Image (cartoon, rainbow, N blue to C red):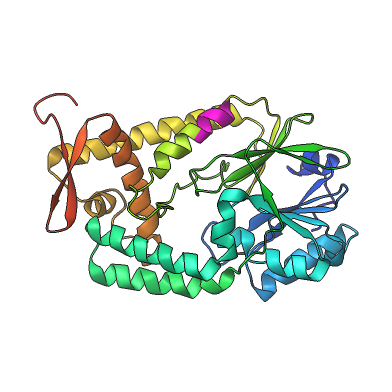
Amino acid sequence: MAPDDAPTGDPYAPAAEQGIHRIAVPTPFAVGRVNVYLIEDSPLTLVDAGPNSASSFDVLQRGVEELGHGLEDIELVILTHQHIDHLGLVGLVASRSGAEVAAIDAAVPFVSRFREQLEADDQYAGATMLRHGMPEEVVIALQAVSRSFWGWGAPVDVTRELRDGEVIELRDRRLEVLLRPGHSPTDTLFHDPERRTLLAADHLLKHISSNPLISRPREDGAPRPQALVTYLDSLRQTREMELDLVLPGHGEPITDHRPLIDERFALHRRRAEKIYGLIAEHPRTAHELAQAIWGNVAVTRAYLTLSEVLGHTDLLLNDGRVREVEADGVVRFEVTDPDGEG
């Protein structure tokens, strides 16, 4: 069904009334379809584009046509962050249309040198997984899976670098650019204050909690970024915003962002306490903690669960409740006050 049909009960009808139309583009990932948004304004603007595949391209092209436009009519493509399910078709759309491509400045080194950056990220991820107790055969298998997905992305030639706090001026609206890292280092939100609407990509999702993935530090030798800590700080900023409608990168729109963010805060508090309880039983690696919580997950989810655990051990480390103990290149976590209440 075309996104501009907006039948009664369509959760995206309020967005369509603002001239923002969702096109749900298929992806190969468990999260399902990615929401690409066409903003009928001047310039005619596409927010994200979906992964690089023929089926995704066909759905995107049909979606734009059903809205009365062609891909060649796109004048501006805005990229929300560096993940391949969002950026894969950006370059193709821009080449077909001659559109300007806008992205936050922090994303430009990654998206412009896409494969080089993925290679470095995979090497860092492999070392991180080994350091936190994941068996080498699992690491090798996961890296092979990761490489198989590289083709779903493609380099992006960014022609307009955005900066946190600047404004994109369209004919009928102003979009404030907000860098809110956590889920990725380059998560960028686009806020229409007049309509109290936020294009949020994967920063806030209704049906699942966004996973703050472990990312490579952008400077060699720098400490591992604390993705969950950063993400929670970003969520706190979003919670303070006056919003009526949040348009996410997957799933349905959000009309009650504060209660949902509070649910996410509570979820992460509970998970941190559960992980603390497991560490209090005896010291464990992050991989052992992940297995204790989720069991033997599919290899494709191994890095996601490790990221989840390390995010919460970061919270516990920062609170002084646990510490890292390294032996033979492998880190285990132990409580700092085994006889106390933590």
Q: Quadrant of the C terminus?
A: top left
Q: Position of residue 156 (x, y in %)?
A: 64, 64
Q: Which residues are magenta?
A: 234-239
| Res 298 seen here | no
Q: Is 59 colored magenta in this rendering?
A: no
In this view, 84 is above or below 198: below
Q: Residue at x 48, y 43 (%)?
A: 182
Q: Nearer the viewer, residue 121 or 38?
A: 121
Q: How many marks?
A: 0
Q: Quadrant of the N terminus?
A: bottom right
Task: Report which quarter residue 323 is drawn in.
Answer: top left
Q: Nearer the viewer, residue 267 or 217?
A: 217
Task: Report which quarter residue 301 is drawn in.
Answer: bottom left
View extreme (front): residue: 220
Q: Position of residue 18 (x, y in %)?
A: 83, 39
Task: Please state if 10 lies on the left or on the right of 122 as rendered.
Answer: right
Q: Position of residue 296 (x, y in %)?
A: 29, 60
Q: Residue at x 35, y 61 (%)?
A: 124
Q: Residue at x 51, y 35 (%)?
A: 234
| Res 146 seen here | yes
Q: Position of residue 53 (x, y in %)?
A: 64, 73
Q: Residue at x 65, y 37 (%)?
A: 254
The secondary structure that dominates the magenta segment is: helix
Task: Report which quarter residue 333 is drawn in.
Answer: top left
View extreme (right): residue: 68
In this view, 279 is above or below 161: above
Task: Please state if 30 lies on the left or on the right of 36 as rendered.
Answer: left
Q: Nearer the viewer, residue 164 or 233?
A: 164
In this view, 81 is above or below 19: below
Q: Is 238 colored magenta in this rendering?
A: yes
